[in-house]
Image (spheres, grey):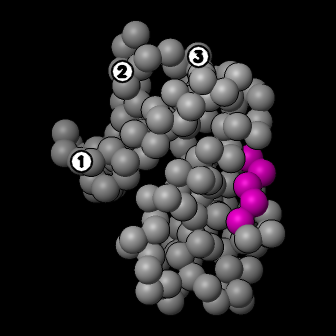
Amino acid sequence: MKDITSFHGSNRFLSNFWPCNIELDGEYYWTVEHAYQAAKTLELDDRKRVQKASTPGQAKALGRHLVMRIEWDVIKLRVMTDLVWQKFSNNPDLRKKLLDTKSARLVEGNTWGDTFWGVCNGVGENHLGDILMRTRTMLRSNP
Protein backbone atom coordinates (compact mmCIF):
# COMPACT_ATOMS: atom_id res chain seq x y z
CA MET A 1 0.00 0.00 0.00
CA LYS A 2 1.16 3.52 -0.81
CA ASP A 3 2.48 5.77 1.98
CA ILE A 4 0.09 8.37 3.40
CA THR A 5 2.16 11.54 3.49
CA SER A 6 -0.34 14.11 4.72
CA PHE A 7 -3.41 14.10 6.89
CA HIS A 8 -5.68 16.00 4.49
CA GLY A 9 -8.61 15.08 2.27
CA SER A 10 -9.73 11.49 2.82
CA ASN A 11 -6.95 11.08 5.39
CA ARG A 12 -7.99 14.10 7.48
CA PHE A 13 -9.31 11.70 10.16
CA LEU A 14 -5.66 11.00 11.09
CA SER A 15 -5.21 14.62 12.17
CA ASN A 16 -5.37 15.62 15.82
CA PHE A 17 -7.84 18.30 14.68
CA TRP A 18 -10.46 15.64 13.78
CA PRO A 19 -13.54 15.81 16.07
CA CYS A 20 -13.76 13.01 18.64
CA ASN A 21 -14.55 12.68 22.33
CA ILE A 22 -11.33 12.60 24.40
CA GLU A 23 -11.04 12.33 28.19
CA LEU A 24 -8.20 13.88 30.17
CA ASP A 25 -8.21 13.79 33.98
CA GLY A 26 -12.00 13.47 34.16
CA GLU A 27 -12.72 16.28 31.67
CA TYR A 28 -13.83 15.84 28.06
CA TYR A 29 -12.37 17.56 25.02
CA TRP A 30 -13.65 17.52 21.46
CA THR A 31 -10.32 16.84 19.72
CA VAL A 32 -6.99 15.24 20.54
CA GLU A 33 -5.45 18.67 19.94
CA HIS A 34 -7.59 20.28 22.64
CA ALA A 35 -6.72 17.58 25.18
CA TYR A 36 -3.02 17.55 24.28
CA GLN A 37 -2.70 21.32 24.65
CA ALA A 38 -4.57 21.24 27.98
CA ALA A 39 -2.29 18.46 29.23
CA LYS A 40 0.71 20.81 28.92
CA THR A 41 -0.30 22.61 32.11
CA LEU A 42 -1.59 21.76 35.57
CA GLU A 43 -3.32 25.16 35.88
CA LEU A 44 -7.05 24.32 35.90
CA ASP A 45 -8.18 27.74 34.64
CA ASP A 46 -5.82 27.45 31.67
CA ARG A 47 -7.04 23.93 30.94
CA LYS A 48 -10.63 25.20 30.92
CA ARG A 49 -9.72 27.97 28.47
CA VAL A 50 -8.14 25.42 26.13
CA GLN A 51 -11.11 23.07 26.56
CA LYS A 52 -13.52 25.85 25.53
CA ALA A 53 -11.48 26.94 22.49
CA SER A 54 -13.82 27.09 19.51
CA THR A 55 -11.38 25.35 17.14
CA PRO A 56 -8.41 23.00 17.45
CA GLY A 57 -6.26 25.74 15.90
CA GLN A 58 -7.32 28.11 18.65
CA ALA A 59 -6.52 25.43 21.27
CA LYS A 60 -3.07 25.03 19.72
CA ALA A 61 -2.48 28.78 19.81
CA LEU A 62 -3.51 28.92 23.48
CA GLY A 63 -1.15 26.02 24.20
CA ARG A 64 1.82 28.13 23.11
CA HIS A 65 1.24 30.50 26.05
CA LEU A 66 0.63 28.09 28.93
CA VAL A 67 2.75 27.63 32.03
CA MET A 68 4.24 24.26 31.12
CA ARG A 69 4.40 21.36 33.53
CA ILE A 70 7.97 20.80 34.68
CA GLU A 71 8.01 17.24 33.34
CA TRP A 72 6.30 18.03 30.01
CA ASP A 73 9.22 17.13 27.76
CA VAL A 74 9.50 13.76 29.53
CA ILE A 75 5.79 12.83 29.29
CA LYS A 76 4.54 14.45 26.07
CA LEU A 77 5.04 11.37 23.88
CA ARG A 78 3.20 9.18 26.38
CA VAL A 79 0.38 11.73 26.65
CA MET A 80 -0.02 11.86 22.87
CA THR A 81 0.07 8.06 22.66
CA ASP A 82 -2.70 7.79 25.26
CA LEU A 83 -4.88 10.41 23.55
CA VAL A 84 -4.46 8.87 20.09
CA TRP A 85 -5.24 5.43 21.52
CA GLN A 86 -8.48 6.80 22.99
CA LYS A 87 -9.45 8.40 19.70
CA PHE A 88 -9.20 5.19 17.72
CA SER A 89 -10.06 2.54 20.32
CA ASN A 90 -13.26 4.27 21.53
CA ASN A 91 -14.69 5.13 18.11
CA PRO A 92 -15.57 2.17 15.86
CA ASP A 93 -15.74 4.30 12.69
CA LEU A 94 -12.32 5.84 13.26
CA ARG A 95 -10.89 2.45 14.26
CA LYS A 96 -12.06 0.97 10.96
CA LYS A 97 -10.64 3.88 8.97
CA LEU A 98 -7.26 3.53 10.68
CA LEU A 99 -7.22 -0.24 10.15
CA ASP A 100 -8.17 0.33 6.49
CA THR A 101 -4.81 2.08 6.01
CA LYS A 102 -3.44 -1.49 6.14
CA SER A 103 0.36 -1.32 6.22
CA ALA A 104 0.76 2.16 4.74
CA ARG A 105 3.50 4.25 6.30
CA LEU A 106 1.75 7.20 7.97
CA VAL A 107 3.65 10.49 7.73
CA GLU A 108 2.36 13.71 9.21
CA GLY A 109 3.65 15.81 6.33
CA ASN A 110 3.30 19.54 6.93
CA THR A 111 4.32 22.96 5.67
CA TRP A 112 4.48 24.71 9.04
CA GLY A 113 7.86 23.40 10.12
CA ASP A 114 6.84 20.72 12.62
CA THR A 115 9.75 18.28 12.50
CA PHE A 116 9.03 16.70 15.87
CA TRP A 117 5.50 15.35 15.32
CA GLY A 118 5.78 15.25 11.54
CA VAL A 119 7.94 15.86 8.50
CA CYS A 120 8.46 19.18 6.71
CA ASN A 121 10.43 19.40 3.45
CA GLY A 122 11.62 15.82 3.91
CA VAL A 123 12.97 16.41 7.43
CA GLY A 124 11.40 15.24 10.65
CA GLU A 125 11.00 12.65 13.36
CA ASN A 126 7.34 11.86 12.54
CA HIS A 127 6.39 10.95 16.11
CA LEU A 128 2.67 11.36 15.39
CA GLY A 129 2.88 9.07 12.38
CA ASP A 130 4.77 6.50 14.47
CA ILE A 131 2.15 6.69 17.24
CA LEU A 132 -0.63 6.19 14.69
CA MET A 133 1.14 3.16 13.20
CA ARG A 134 1.72 1.63 16.66
CA THR A 135 -1.93 2.30 17.53
CA ARG A 136 -2.99 0.54 14.32
CA THR A 137 -0.85 -2.48 15.22
CA MET A 138 -2.31 -2.62 18.74
CA LEU A 139 -5.87 -2.36 17.40
CA ARG A 140 -5.19 -5.25 15.01
CA SER A 141 -4.09 -7.44 17.92
CA ASN A 142 -7.02 -6.29 20.15
CA PRO A 143 -10.14 -6.68 17.97
Q: Residue at x 44, y 80 (%)?
A: 71
Q: Quadrant of the C terminus?
A: top right
Mark with earlier residue (1, 3)? 3
Callout 2: SS:
loop
Q: Is residue 79 magenta?
A: no
Which span is picked out in magenta?
Answer: 20-24
Q: Residue at x 52, y 19 (%)?
A: 101
Residue 58 visible in rendering: no
Horizontal and vertical percent position of residue 66:
52, 85
Q: Which residue is mark 3?
A: 100
Q: Is residue 21 magenta?
A: yes
Q: Quadrant of the N terminus?
A: top left
Task: Locate residue 74: give its quadrant.
Answer: bottom left
Q: Which residue is mark 1?
A: 124
User: As drawn, is 42 to the left or to the right of 21?
Assistant: left
Horizontal and vertical percent position of residue 111:
32, 48
Mark with earlier residue (2, 3)? 2
Going by the numbered disc 3, the residue's amino acid type is Asp
Residue 73 visible in rendering: yes
Q: Which residue is mark 2?
A: 3
Going by the numbered disc 1, the residue's amino acid type is Gly
> Is 119 located above or below residue 138 in the figure?
below
Callout 1: SS:
loop
**Residues at marks 1 and 3 touching, judged by CB atoms closer than 8 Å:** no
